[in-house]
Image: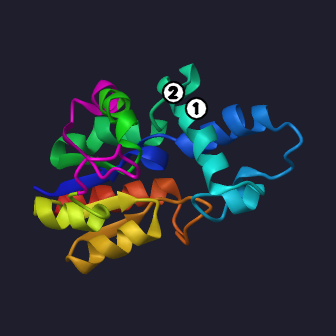
């Protein structure tokens, strides 16, 4: 049985899109940028703001009612309902450590029937908190589990491939995935059925 490692933000949910439309665009109605134009993550340069300005806006959205009430990606949830029992699943996210309890609860609330393991590589943590892993590749190397990483960040996919994992890029404007979300899920279906 394969073990699939799922990125949370922008794979299991659409955090960046929701932040952009319900957070950023609400705060900046003059912004003419479209979501598909966000070809870098973080997108601060595309938006003409500082990195800190972007982080402050994203952090505020994560703590907002809309951020806490994100819906799961409907296609992914449907995939889990049909095929989830054919594999083991791990959620692995990189976000500020202070938001980990909220996102862990979100994962278990929406995907807890299948995802039994939750990991975090803090993108930011309070002073004095040990930095066990620099990135998801370090975490996955330490964990020693996981056959396939599904992620939207090219650096994470490269790091996983370097330790021998198969990888699938979840389509987002900031990566070069040529597959649709439906095609990625079809590939996963074939992988778990062959295992």
Q: Residues within 10 Å of mark 1 (few under 14, many from 20)?
A: some
The residue to which callout 1 is attached is 60
- Is 73 covered by the magenta stretch? no
- Comparing 102 with 158, the one in front is 102
Callout 2 secondary element: helix
Q: CA distance from mark 2 to mark 1?
A: 5 Å
- Image location (x, y in percent) of residue 172: 57, 58
Q: Which residues are magenta?
A: 107-131
Q: Are marks 2 and 1 in contact (CB under 8 Å)?
A: yes
- Comparing 79 with 135, the one in front is 135
Which mark identifies residue 156? Answer: none
Residue lying at the far bottom in this picture: please name it. Answer: 162
The image quarter in which residue 135 lies: bottom left
Q: Is residue 59 left or right of residue 115?
A: right
Q: Is residue 8 among what the camera can see?
A: yes
Q: Is residue 175 left or right of residue 113?
A: right
Write the residue at 45% across / 70% down.
154
The residue to which callout 2 is attached is 63
Above-or-below relation of 144 to 91: below
């Amino acid at each position: 049985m394969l073990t699939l490692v799922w990125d949370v933000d922008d794979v299991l949910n659409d955090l960046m899109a929701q932040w952009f439309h319900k957070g950023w665009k609400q705060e900046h109605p003059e912004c003419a940028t479209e979501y598909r134009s966000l070809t870098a993550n973080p997108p601060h340069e595309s938006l003409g703001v500082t990195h800190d300005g972007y982080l402050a806006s994203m952090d505020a959205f994560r703590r907002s009612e809309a951020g806490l009430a994100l819906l799961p990606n409907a296609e992914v949830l449907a995939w889990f309902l049909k095929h989830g029992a054919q594999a083991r699943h791990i959620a692995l996210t990189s976000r500020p450590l202070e938001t980990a309890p909220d996102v862990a609860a979100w994962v278990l609330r929406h995907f807890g029937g299948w995802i039994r393991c939750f990991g975090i590589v803090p993108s930011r943590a309070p002073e004095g908190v040990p930095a066990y892993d620099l990135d998801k590749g370090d975490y996955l190397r330490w964990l020693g589990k996981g056959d396939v990483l599904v992620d939207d960040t090219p650096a994470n996919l490269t790091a996983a491939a370097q330790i021998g994992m198969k990888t699938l890029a979840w389509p987002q404007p900031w990566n070069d995935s040529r597959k649709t979300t439906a095609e990625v899920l079809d590939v996963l279906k074939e992988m778990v059925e062959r295992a």
